[in-house]
Image (cartoon, rainbow, N blue to C red):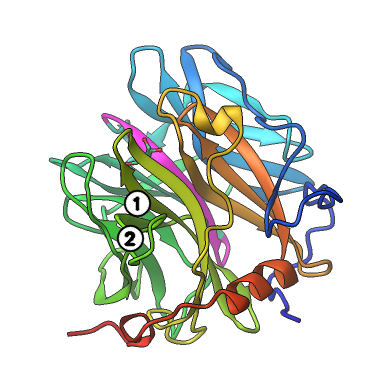
Amino acid sequence: MAKILSSPLPNIPWEDRPSDCSEPMWRFSGNPITKRNPVGEVARIFNSAVMPYNEGFVGVFRGEQKNGVPHIYLGRSSDGISWDFGKEKIPFTDPDGKPFMPIYAYDPRLVKVEDVYYIIWCQDFYGASIGIAKTTDFKKFERIENPFLPYNRNAVLFPRKIGGRYVMLSRPCDNGHTAFGDIFLSESPDMELWGRHRHVMSPSHRWWDAMKIGAGPAPIETDLGWLLIYHGVVNTCNGYVYSIGAAILDRDEPSKVLHRCTDYLLTPEEWYEERGFVPNVCFPCAALADSETGRIALYYGCADSYVGIAFTDIDTVTDFILTHDCTTETDTEIGKR
Ligand code: BMA
């Protein structure tokens, strides 16, 4: 039995596992929760992140505009399922208050550390790199320094400081549709200066996550360690296939992988995952968790076209990882050479 260590979330979206399903993760029967042309100039919403806020939920959504350029839009919801999206892109400012609009912005994550909400996304910085902004009220969004050099397109913060420092997972890459990628970790005393870089995980020798891997939602703290849900990619003769897997990282030294799962938790099977702008993509970006019941609701992008929700609970997912454990020596090391 594992215990989630974050706050209770009694209004977490939830459906019980269907009686005919024996998988470790099951899809919401109302999937997908977004439709094509959802608002204004936006053609598709996918790869997006949500959090509890006040009595309901708030989210940062990747909106692919009709001109093909992705930007980030705010969404609000009372139940975490039906969303009202802002028509305008999130109006970021520089620290001096001047408007700042990235040339493009995609795959946002949303993480609260202490009393501040951070949005972390991919943007142009003379090449694809990570951008960050902070907000406390979802009205003012102040961008802060870019944490890394290009190229890096996939990053997420841990939801609390570890050893007194902010900790971020990311995946260095190239300037194309990168055919490689390991998860690394970096630390910062102030969310501005990043260092103490460590290797966390490489792609595996198994097929579903053999080409590249990247962190999904902010890791979920449990008494067994940090539950990391990630995407794993395999290259096929018809292109890349993105599935969802999981690992457990050490609570105090999260570059150490304690357990890693041989099998994926979710892989493209439904029409909205197999068919769309980019077929065969399940891309996790956010997870809500209720410490009282152990319930987890995962938000994932579907075929670069929609947002879907899948459910699991902490006992089911940790049992599945532990009974399909394939951790190797390079996983369990501290990751410094
Ligand atoms: C990755 C990212 C994701 C996207 C995926 C599949 O490289 O760009 O935004 O969902 O490719 O197209």
Q: Residue 135 placed where, x, y %?
A: 50, 48
Start-end of magenta stretch? 103-115
Task: List x then y, in percent, for residue 213.
Answer: 36, 58
Above-or-below relation of 147 to 188: above
Mark 2 residue type:
Ser
> Pointers 1 and 2 in contact (CB under 8 A)?
yes
* Three-letter amino acid code at the position of disc 1: Asn
> Would residue 95 be seen by someone viewing this image from the given angle?
no
- Quarter of the displayed picture in which ligand 1 can be seen: top left
Residue at screen point 52% across, 83% down: 251
Mark 2, residue position: 170
Inspect the magenta stretch and tell me whether residue 110 lies in it.
yes
The disc at residue 154 is 1
Residue projecting furthest to the front? 237
Say whether residue 123 is magenta: no
Residue 144 is marked as none
- The residue shown at (34%, 13%) is 67
x, y percent for residue 163: 44, 86
Q: Can residue 146 be seen in this view?
A: yes
